[in-house]
Amino acid sequence: MKEIVREVQQRLNKEDVKVPEQLVGVDPHVRHIMEKLDIDYHDGQAIKMGDTSKKVLGIYGIAGVGKTVLAKYVYSHLCYLYVVRSFAGKIQAEIEHHDTLYVQNKLISDLSDGNAQPFKSSENALKFIKKNFKKSKILLLLDDVKDHEQLSELVGKLDWLGPGSRVIVTSQRNDVLKNVDGAETFVLRLMGKDEALTLFCRHAFGADSPRRKFKTLSRKIVTATGRLPLALQVVGSSLCLEDSVEVWKETLAALKAAPHKSVQAALEKSYTNLDENEQQIFLDIACFFVGKDNRIPYYMWADCKYSPSKSILALNAGSLVEIGEDNKLRMHEILKNFGREMVKKESRKEPCKRSRLYDHEEALHVLKKRKGTEVVEALRLEFGDRSEEHTMLDCDEFDGLENLRFLKLDRADIQGNFGDRLSSLRWLDWQGCPKNINVRRLNLNLQNLVVLNLSGSQVDGDWRGWELLKQARKLKVLKLTGCAQLIATPEFPASMELERLILEGCSKLAVIHPSFGNLTKLVYLNLKGCSCLSELPDLGPMRALKELVIDGTSITRIDFQEGSMRKLQILSALSCERLTEISDSITHLKSVTYLALDGSDIGTLPEPIGSLEQLKTLSLKNCERLIDLPDGIGKLTSLQALDLSNTAISKLPTSVKDLKAMKVLRMRRTFIREFPRAILNLEKLEEIDFSLCRNLEGMVPDEIRGSSSLAVLNLSSTQICALPACLSLLSRLQKLDISRCDKLESLPELPSSLIIVR
């Protein structure tokens, strides 16, 4: 009878955790998490555990995204499988209000069914945890762990788990389990638009859709909350009994200006956990750099001793900043608004006492009223095409701004003798600067400048402003994007330590000044869209160059000197329509990992291309004259992605069987006639795309069973007539596209792992 009672209690299990009733869109997350935890989960019920001895999972995301709710929901579905279990909630708050020992004693009490005496020291509590639970099958939820140090102080190394145990940890930091071998991760993203609207409506109207009167306002409010579940819940609840349209409009206006106070409080907690350097960089990004290349502000932050490499990693780990594959800084809208609100809080009524002036009107007011103070570190003006505004600024208007390190002038004109007023400036963003400025007369004194952006300006070879290059001896970044009148680059001083030169979109640029050879520390050169440039400059001295972008230029041949370009990692030559030859000198690129020649006029690749031992990505799509690949391709032992789409290739060389690291093969709209057997035993291959290969016929060979990692198989619009019976053995296959395969009459048994079938 005791066993029956215990079993019933476990299955009912209502006392452990309380889960909100109005959950939206949680099921797909739960299924994914259960899979990572190796739990057999069907029809909303956890059936049994897999054979895995123990599993640890971290659920990450920004404050208010719903990590705790999701974790508690999963925990509640697993409880009846465990006798020994514990939910430790709000760990950071508990430790702040009490201490680590308090949480440890609660944890030990839960896992000991209340039979353990409280410990008086954290060290003894840790010893007890490690000694007494190694044989127990445990379910543990550790909610809101600050970082891996706090986790270690709390429970040690999680090596005390018994067979069949499961641990779920929620945290804003994605590195909280970095010391736990085999730990799984789940990043909780923002809700979709429809799900967010449903959640809001459930709290605001008690229904899944808005009342007609508030339909438009509801959608706008959902957008203003950034689709953050916490904000949707609290704002919806606050408007539940409110029938005044004006109140709803005022709520919308307030949300556009700053996050809701409950969200603000949650985010402030994350913000205060950052060190001073991380806070500085977070505020800079929120005010100025969302959507910008993270590699450029790095130079300003480094010169200001903000430790950007370490700080950016910390911000990323804390779910406060993301860096996309394009190196762009990304920040959730609600975090951006929160950062700007933190700056406003520095002085509500006097913008001149804030560290950052990102609003054009406020920045211009401070200058025109000569209210500059030493507090202001960054100031942005955006005149754009506002021709009605007076864009002339006098040097006296910059009085008091002696600590200014970032200045965006944007089409403004300046006059007077600046003296030391801008001597602290690290970044001058002067897009659309006037053609007729006299730098000597301005006496800008930019000896600390590391970034200069003159994009969209009418500068040319005779522009007198090139004197700036001699003055700015610490300059690391020169950006001249879209300078349409620039025919020849300026002369580069011998002492220049420039690392990034961006000439993208200089459509008339045809001549690179011989002094280019002085830029021996250059790591990045961007000539994209310089359509008049038919010959590359001498890159021999560029021993530090890591990235070369020559997309859309008129070059006809790629040739490198022996001993040069040894550090080059990325070579992008997209849409170089006159490029007909890649010389054998490409073998000098010993460090290249990415090579893209899409849209060029080449007919083949040099045989020695196999010497590029570090190459991971080779993209040749839209090279319509490319008819074959050399056998040397098989020597690219590091190659992970090969794209041959829209080429004239009809057959792969047999040497591709040696591309053991290959993960992605795309050959859309090529002339292959049969499924290439040489790729079928590549165990790491995850994607095969032969769509629109209208000559491809026959059956997919049985040997495809050797592609054990295959997740995507696209055969749409081909003449394939049969799929092998062994297809069901591909346990990782998630997407199968056989649409418009008119000769395919029947299907074999398909693997249960499939998510999308077309």
Image (cartoon, rainbow, N blue to C red):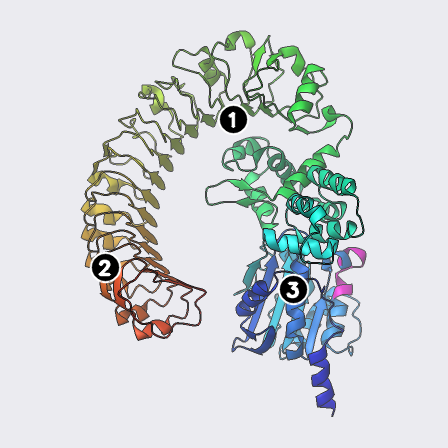
Q: Give the quarter of the image for residue 285.
A: top right
Local SS, label 2 = loop
Label located before the other in sequence (1 or 3): 3
Q: Nearer the viewer, mark 1 or mark 3?
A: 3
How busy is the neighbourhood of tag 1: few (under 14 within 10 Å), some, or many (20 plus)?
Answer: many
| Magenta-colored span | 95-103
Does the magenta-highlighted stretch encompass residue 722? no
Residue on which disc 3 sits = 71
Q: What residue type is labelled 3?
A: Ala
Q: Please, is residue 100 above or below residue 289 in the view?
A: below
Residue 658 vs residue 691, the one in the foreground: 691
Quadrant assignment for the C terminus: bottom left
Q: Which of marks 1 and 2 is in front?
A: 2
Taking 512 as reference, is 16 left or right?
right
- The disc label shown at residue 13, or none: none
Q: Which residue lies furthest to the bottom in this view?
A: 1
Q: Distance between the residues labelled 1 and 3?
A: 46 Å
Does the magenta-highlighted stretch encompass residue 100? yes
Residue on which disc 1 sits = 450
Q: Give the quarter of the image for residue 507.
A: top left
How busy is the neighbourhood of tag 2: few (under 14 within 10 Å), some, or many (20 plus)?
Answer: many
Residue on which disc 2 sits = 696
Q: Do the residues labelled 3 and 2 touch (CB within 8 Å)?
A: no
Q: What residue type is labelled 2?
A: Leu
Q: Please, is residue 18 above or below residue 94 in the view?
A: below
Q: How far apart are marks 3 and 2 (CA)?
A: 48 Å
How busy is the neighbourhood of tag 3: few (under 14 within 10 Å), some, or many (20 plus)?
Answer: many
Q: Please, is residue 685 above or below residue 124 in the view?
A: above
